[in-house]
Each structure stands twice: as C-alpha cells, then as structure tokens.
Amino acid sequence: MALKFLKHFNTRATPQTEPIPGKTMTPNSAGGYSFAVDDWTRLERFMILGSEGGSYYATERALTLENAKAVVRCVEADAPRAIRTIVEISESGRAPRNEPAAMALAIAAGTGHVAAASEALPRVCRTGTHLFAFAETVQNVRGWGRGLRRGVAAWYEGKTPDALAYQVAKYQSREGWSHRDLLRLTHPKTSDPARQAVYRWVVGGVEALGPREVKRGEAAATYPDVSTHLPRLLAAMDEARTADRDVVIRLIRDDGLPRECVPTNHLNDPAVWEALLGKMPLMAMVRNLAKMTTVGLLKPGSEASRTVRDRLADGDSLRKSRLHPLAILLASAVYSTGRGLKGKLTWEPVATIKDALEDAFYKAFGNVVPAGKRTLIGLDVSGSMACGQVGGTPLTPREAAAALALVTARVEPEYHVMAFQDRFVPLDVSARSRLTDVLARTASLPFGGTDCALPMRHATERGLKVDTFIVLTDSETWAGPIHPSQALREYREKSGLPARLIVAGLVSNGFSVADPQDAGMLDVVGFDASAPDLMAGFSRGDF
C-alpha cells in the first residue's frame, strides 16, 4: 500500500496534466502544465511573433492583452532595459514586422516614460507605417499629452525635407491614421521653407503652397509662398496623377517616384514595372514578384528575372535591408503556388526565381556556424500548431516550424527530424527537401494532442545518441505520461550523455517546456532571425 501511495509523489515521471512536485509550473491553455516564461522572454516573443490570429486555445485579443500586461511589467521593473530591448529588436531586423515594437514603445510611453519613449521613437518608428502603429496604440492606451505630441513632432522635425517627402509620399495612411492627422495633432515647428512646403502640401495639397493669411480670433498669421521649395518627389507625385506612360516612367527614373505614387492605371504596364525595379527596395521587390510576373516583366531568360535573382543572392544586402526570413518564406510559399492569397491574381512562376527565393531564405539567417553535434529536431505538428499566425503572416506555427527545422538540417552534419503530436507522425524532411514541398506536407497533416516529451522518449527507447534536442512547439503540451524536462533527465541518465534541450517557441504565449532552473535547457523565440546562430552556440556549449 505504501508503495502505491508513494507513486503519486514520483518526481521522475509526472503526467503532463499535473505539475511536477517541487517545481513552479502553471496551467497552459490546453489544460496541461508548463513552465511560465518570464516577462522579458514574453516581451521578446511578442515583438518577434506578434499575436495576430491568436492560437488554438487563446484568442488574438486575449494574447494581445496578456502580452501588453507583460510589457507594462517589464517597463515598471526596469524601464531603460525595456526600451533598450524594444530598440535593439527593432533595429536589428530580428522580427518579421516592426509594428509590435512600435506598439510596445507606445505602451512604455503610456506607463509614464514619455521622454525616454519619445527619444527612442525615430529609431523604432523608421517609417510612416511604424509611426501610425505607434499613434494608434497611444490613442487606445493612454491618449495624447503634451510630451507625446512633442515626441511625434520631433519625428517630423528630425528628417531632412527630402527624407520627409519620401515618407509622406510612400506611407500615406495606415491604421486609420494619416500624416495630415498627425501634423494637425502635433504642430511641428520649422523655419525651413522646404519643410514648411511639405507640411502645407500634406495638410492642404498644392493649393496650400501659395501665400496665405490665417485668422485665429482677432489675430492673423501670414505665410509666404513656398511652392518653389516643394521637394521634387512631391511635385512628381502631383504630376504623375494625370501623366501618360512615358512621363510616369521618367518620373520614376529621374525623381524616384515609388510604386505607391504610381497611378493605378499604369500598374499593369511591364515597362512601368521595369522602371520601378531599377530602384525598388529589396523588401518591396520581394512583395511584388507575383505582380511583376503577372504583367510579363519576369519570365524565363529575361533581364529583369536575372536582376531579381542577383539581388536575392546577395546575402549582405538581404541582411542590411532587414528583410526577415519569414517574409521571404511567405513570398516563396505564395509565389510558388501561382495564386494570390487574396483577389484573383494568378501567374506562372519562374523556376529560377523560385530557387532564388529558397536560397535567400537560408541566407537571411546569416552565416550560422554548425554546432557539429548529434541533433534531433522534434517538430510539433499537433492541432494547436495548425492554428493562428506567425509574425503577422498567413503561415501557421506548424508550417513555420517545419521551415525552421530545415535551417538546422541544412547546417548540421548529423541530424534527425521527427514529427510528433501525441504520437509519431510520418513526415519526410531532410536537408535536401524543398521549402514549398515541406510546407505543403505539413499543412495537410491530421490534428492531434501534444506530447512534447516524445522526442526524448523516442531517443531513450531506441538508444539513439543525441547531444542536442531541438523542439519546435507552442508549448501547449498535455497528452503525455511524463513532462519533457523529466524525459530529458531520464535520457541523460540512461544514455550517459549530457544532452541539451532547446525549445523554440512559435506562439507568443507565456509557456515553455524548458525548465528555467536547468542550465542544459534553453528557451528561444522561434523565427527570431538570430535564433539559428544562438541555438548552434548553445549546442556547442559556448554558454
């Protein structure tokens, strides 16, 4: 009887629906128990993964609110560190979208750290789109005070007239905000006639550039004619509205007119797209591959196709452009299908561009030095991983995890990939697998529960020699008879190997299966652009 009673206190094999005795664990959204990640990890997860689409167990709103509370706690605990973290992730290009960083900065401002947040604003909100995300969060979190209005005014005042003209032309409105709204709200100051011309053009159009007298009660203010000081890009934008094809092409080539300023009636002309391609930023080029193929500019053997391939092959340019691997993965997945996610756009993919996109995906992670360790990659393909979105893309966590597994498989000389739910799932993945094929196979897998201990149990039962386990998951584990951390310790004891566990989280929730008290376990943010290099360093024992 005593032995039967003692089994309930077994710390070597505890069902995942119960916490490990003596460990601080928390119920996850699936009904199992996991380790709670600290707020700093949650801050990084939110800025890199976002919370769009929610998850199988938690809605988008619930995840966003939980992440926002974690941001607040970080700021209250150490505001300088929190704002440094926001700036570092934003500037380094580790995240696929910058809007979560802009939102986090606005939340920091909402907790009373207006001056520090305003100082960081130009570094985090580098484009008008980022600024609009910041403004929308401010509007919803705390409202506008004098300090924040000054901070946004400084964003405009800190740019040269030409740089400011580019911002107001390319990023005209987002998130329900426009530059006109923000200029009227913040009233930036300037004595520079070129900057005055930009402000007046944004608020009132070309008609507002001439001499003006504005009455405010009994007082009147006189404004001089600044029409001759309007930056050439804005003048070109006005000219393009009624211009023919040849003039539009000239404006693109001579004045740098971006795609957003080209009238819609010219955007089915391959010659117009050829002119745009010459100066198109790399990120914009990747986003417009389908359109350029549809209009006939990109086709087998064309000069334009060669230009695209050459630019995608330049690893240094990829990283300097902050083009995130997830953005390339999405572009590759969509381009290869020949059909847009929305609308009726279809095209015949160019094979060499498909190959270039796949190669660019790996290059975007940088030069990852292999760990040279025997690595088992456990790919969670359970039902919960098939829901939600990663980094604001339509890709599910299970699709993103499969692609991330390929990055490690391409680098490590000794690896094994296994897919699991609450049981093993056949999935043919190797270093030679094509991204698009793996995504298609992963998307069609059946649903199931989650047992993140299976990779370690599998290695123990079969006597496999593993130095590092990598589990790509949402940590919503519940279906196993033993916790993953316990399974790892059991593997270590039976194999005699000091095996390590890396948990790559693919959802911005508060859970991890890695025991924070075990130095041989590491929790990382899945699809952080720096994650593969970090994982290889941990596997080597660098830290």
Image: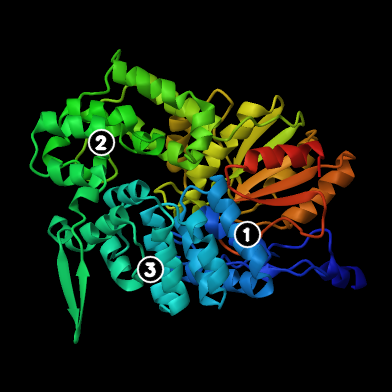
SS label for mark 3: helix
Looking at the image, the residue that sits furthest to the bottom is: 218
Residue type beneath disc 2: Asp
Foreground mark, 3 or 1, reads: 1
Which residue sits at x=17%, y=36%?
Answer: 267
Residue 164 drawn at (x, y percent) = 35, 51
Write down the residue under mark 1: 84
Residue type beneath disc 1: Arg
The answer to which of 374 and 146 lies nearer the viewer is 146
Residue 509 drawn at (x, y percent) = 57, 62
Residue 265 seen in the figure: yes
Write down the residue under mark 2: 255
Write down the residue under mark 3: 136
Which residue sits at x=47%, y=53%?
Answer: 98
The answer to which of 398 and 281 lies nearer the viewer is 281
SS label for mark 2: helix
SS label for mark 1: helix
Q: Quadrant of the C terminus?
A: top right
